[in-house]
């Protein structure tokens, strides 16, 4: 049995400590390039105070459909992003996953892929879910390649949802089912 | 004045969209939710029975926290004025001109008679000509063939299929994603 399941080859998933999270989100949110990959909302930096208030509210009344972690780089113990299973439908064994790697210098090093591997194992082997869904913007080719590599399949795209820089952009829907993940990772059911 | 300016955009051929008091909705919705087939067509959540009091409290709280990102209506039949369901836009993303639509016809006596399709046509006109949105999205379960046909009739296109989204009666069911863009809707309106 794998017991240290929140630690991968490059990163570790750690608790959402409000000070390190607030420091991270405040720094990352200064780059609209990061925000536009992450979210459909208008880009806007988050103050340290706003992030702390948001986390405190969450910790006070933790939603039962959310498992949220920070991503820590093993090499230097820096917090580089966050990842969450959100909107878990326990009765159907299904959840959304969302991930963000905050600083450009940490992109393309495999940190996101490693964090996703950890959370898929957690979702399928700890929470015993059946299906993980995600959506991603069509212009985020780096993320789409990562998700494909992990075994997510394309399930459709919503045409022209986003209006950015005078173009309309699709949102891609992807999903991975437990039987497929077991095969890909050479595991028994 | 443009010819359409005088038209009542909140009324269709069979139904009109209304605003109802919390006690009226609480009574109707707690009655509709007794039918688990209705709730399984409507939502991913488990069938639950809420008392009229609990339902009314929910509607009252909802009024307090009203946001312009959600625009909900109720559906009444023209003629006998019976309250048969609801329809609404949620998570409107004003910057992108996009929203989700949801609809429920609560009483099965009124299924398959075109009321839902008519309400959807009224709502699309509202979304595209009053709110000036660009795109409307919806999700529907694969076993809800009646709804899928109705959405196709209203002009929605199938865009995707979330495999095995639901576990119902021991089988996995897909969630379908559909959408309609304003240029598509404008072409069908003429």
Image: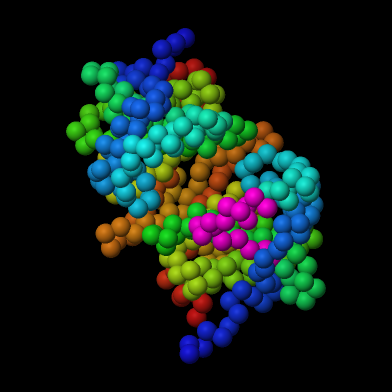
On screen, A43 above or below A104?
Answer: below
Count all numbered tags in the image, as a single digit. Answer: 0
Q: Residue at x 55, y 52 (%)?
A: B139
Q: Nearer the viewer, residue B23 or B127?
A: B23
Looking at the picture, how far across and down is residue B98, in whole percent? 44, 60
Q: Quadrant of residue A37?
A: top left
Looking at the picture, how far across and down is residue B133, in whole percent? 45, 66
Q: Nearer the viewer, residue A26 or A156?
A: A26
Q: Residue furthest left?
A: A105
Q: Is A84 left, or right, of A29 in this rendering?
A: right
Residue A157 in view, yes or no: yes
Residue A63, magenta (yes or no): no
Looking at the picture, how far across and down is residue A162, in whole percent? 37, 56
Q: Residue at x 27, y 19 (%)?
A: A77
Q: Is A1 left, or right, of A14 in this rendering?
A: right
Q: Nearer the viewer, residue A89 or A74?
A: A74
Q: Which residues are magenta?
A: B59-75
Residue B178 in view, yes or no: no
Q: Residue at x 51, y 88 (%)?
A: B3
Q: Quadrant of residue B75?
A: bottom right
Residue B61, magenta (yes or no): yes
Q: Is B40 left, or right, of A156 in this rendering?
A: right
Looking at the picture, how far across and down is residue B15, in whole percent? 69, 72
The colour scheme of the drawn protein is: rainbow
On screen, B190 above or below A32?
Answer: below
Q: Quadrant of residue A155?
A: top left
On screen, B100 above or below A183?
Answer: below
Q: Residue at x 59, y 31 (%)?
A: A90
């Amino acid at each position: 049995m794998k017991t240290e399941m929140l630690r991968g080859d490059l990163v570790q998933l750690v608790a959402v400590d409000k000070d390190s999270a607030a420091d991270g989100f405040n720094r990352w949110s200064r780059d609209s390039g990061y925000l536009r990959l992450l979210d459909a909302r208008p880009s806007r930096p988050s103050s340290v105070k706003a992030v702390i208030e948001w986390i405190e509210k969450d910790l006070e009344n933790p939603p039962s459909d959310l498992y949220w972690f920070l991503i820590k780089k093993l090499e230097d113990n820096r917090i580089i992003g966050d990842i969450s299973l959100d909107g878990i439908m326990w009765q159907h064994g299904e959840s959304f996953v969302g991930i963000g790697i905050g600083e450009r210098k940490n992109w393309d090093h495999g940190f996101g892929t490693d964090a996703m591997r950890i959370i898929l194992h957690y979702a399928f082997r700890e929470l015993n879910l059946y299906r993980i869904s995600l959506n991603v913007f069509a212009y985020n080719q780096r993320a789409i390649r990562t998700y494909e590599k992990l075994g997510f399949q394309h399930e459709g795209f919503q045409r022209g949802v986003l209006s950015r820089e005078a173009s309309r952009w699709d949102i891609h829907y992807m999903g991975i089912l437990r039987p497929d993940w077991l095969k890909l990772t050479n595991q028994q059911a | 004045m443009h010819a359409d300016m005088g038209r009542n955009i909140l009324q269709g051929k069979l139904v009109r969209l209304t605003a109802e008091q919390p006690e009226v909705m609480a009574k109707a919705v707690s009655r509709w939710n007794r039918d688990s087939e209705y709730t399984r067509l409507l939502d991913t959540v488990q069938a639950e029975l809420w008392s009229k009091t609990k339902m009314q409290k929910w509607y009252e709280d909802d009024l307090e926290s009203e946001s312009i990102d959600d625009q909900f209506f109720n559906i009444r039949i023209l003629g006998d004025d019976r309250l048969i369901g609801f329809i609404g836009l949620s998570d409107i993303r004003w910057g992108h001109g996009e929203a989700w639509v949801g609809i429920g016809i609560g009483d099965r006596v009124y299924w398959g008679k075109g009321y839902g399709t008519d309400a959807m046509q009224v709502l699309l006109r509202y979304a595209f000509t009053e709110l000036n949105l660009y795109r409307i999205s919806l999700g529907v379960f694969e076993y809800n063939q009646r709804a899928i046909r109705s959405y196709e009739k209203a002009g929605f296109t199938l865009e995707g299929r979330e495999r095995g989204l639901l576990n119902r009666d021991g089988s996995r069911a897909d969630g379908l994603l559909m959408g309609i863009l304003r240029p598509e809707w404008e072409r069908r309106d003429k």
